[in-house]
């Protein structure tokens, strides 16, 4: 029995509608919506920067307690300014929503997708070692590059640069410092020509790009409405 039912049971009016209880229920729902808004980016539906810091701190603390690694993927859309300049800011927003929808389809339910700022994003991968995190990032990279978006009647191929790093719990590292360290791999990817995944290569060998059976069970399954012919797409590469 919830708190509102208990109030209703104790109300002298009992079976009649109680405006006070109804108002309390509405206030509780409003508070819940406000809390969600304070944590969520309105355009993409991803968590915002403030939530990113809080969630990452929590996962890093969990790593220290359990020994289960926390990986972080930083993503920056390539040549996004050109998209805004060519097609306008509304189309730029559509490109952001398109990209984040694709990535949302390809991560686990336990993964935490956040908008870091502008066209840059972060995905926290709890309990994930570096090889698996790079595997995920590579899959996200390919999924985006293979799914052009329609902007002003043109098919535009989007790409992004990815940086991946892992926290093992042995370092005295803040969430902000972990983000900055991972972001350096994004800059490395930009310098290498973009549309790539960068990480500490000495840590791992060859990384597969397919989806494992375990991951298939954990992935989001929200199909995107627009299916485009990819041969005619225009890419900013």
Image: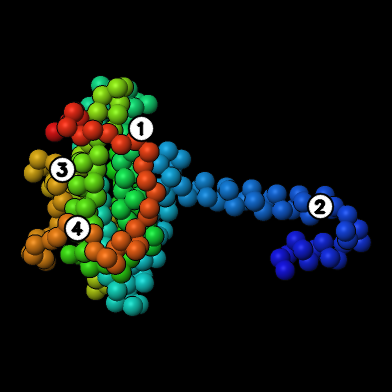
4 lies above or below 187 = below
Pointer 4: what residue?
210
Q: Is residue 12 left or right of residue 171?
A: right
Circles 3 and 2 in contact, beta carbons < 8 Å: no
Label 4, secondary structure: give it: loop
Closer-to-camera residue (74/110): 110
Label 2, secondary structure: give it: helix
Tell me the CA gap for discs 4 and 2. Answer: 55 Å
Quarter that holds the C terminus: top left
Pointer 1: what residue?
94
Which one is in front in this view, the residue at disc 3 or the one at disc 4?
4
Pointer 3: what residue?
195
Picture coordinates of residue 174, whole percent (x, y): 31, 62
Circles 4 and 1 in contact, beta carbons < 8 Å: no
111 lies above or below 222 = below
The extreme right residue here reads 12
Q: Is residue 236 left or right of residue 217?
A: left
Name which of mark 1 and mark 3 comes first in the sequence. 1
Name which of mark 3 and mark 2 comes first in the sequence. 2
Residue in the picture at 34% in, 63% down:
217
The quadrant in which residue 86 appears is: top left
């Amino acid at each position: 029995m919830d708190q509102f039912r208990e109030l209703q049971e104790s109300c002298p009016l009992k079976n009649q509608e109680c405006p006070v209880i109804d108002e309390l229920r509405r206030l509780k729902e409003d508070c819940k919506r406000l809390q969600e808004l304070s944590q969520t980016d309105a355009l993409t539906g991803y968590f915002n920067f403030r939530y990113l810091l809080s969630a990452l701190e929590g996962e890093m603390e969990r790593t220290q307690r359990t020994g289960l690694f926390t990986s972080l993927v930083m993503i920056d859309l390539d040549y996004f300014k050109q998209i805004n300049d060519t097609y306008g800011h509304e189309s730029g927003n559509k490109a952001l929503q398109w990209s984040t929808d694709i990535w949302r389809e390809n991560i686990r339910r336990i993964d935490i997708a956040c908008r870091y700022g502008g066209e840059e994003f972060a995905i926290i991968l709890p309990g994930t070692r570096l090889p698996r995190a790079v595997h995920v990032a590579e899959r996200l990279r390919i999924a985006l590059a293979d799914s052009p978006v329609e902007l002003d009647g043109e098919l535009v191929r989007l790409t992004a640069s990815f940086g991946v790093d892992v926290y093992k719990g042995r370092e005295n590292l803040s969430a902000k410092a972990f983000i900055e360290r991972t972001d350096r791999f994004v800059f490395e990817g930009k310098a290498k020509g973009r549309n790539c995944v960068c990480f500490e290569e000495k840590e791992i060998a060859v990384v597969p790009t397919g989806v494992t059976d375990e991951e298939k069970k954990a992935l989001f399954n929200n199909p995107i409405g627009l299916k485009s012919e990819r041969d005619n797409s225009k890419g900013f590469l």
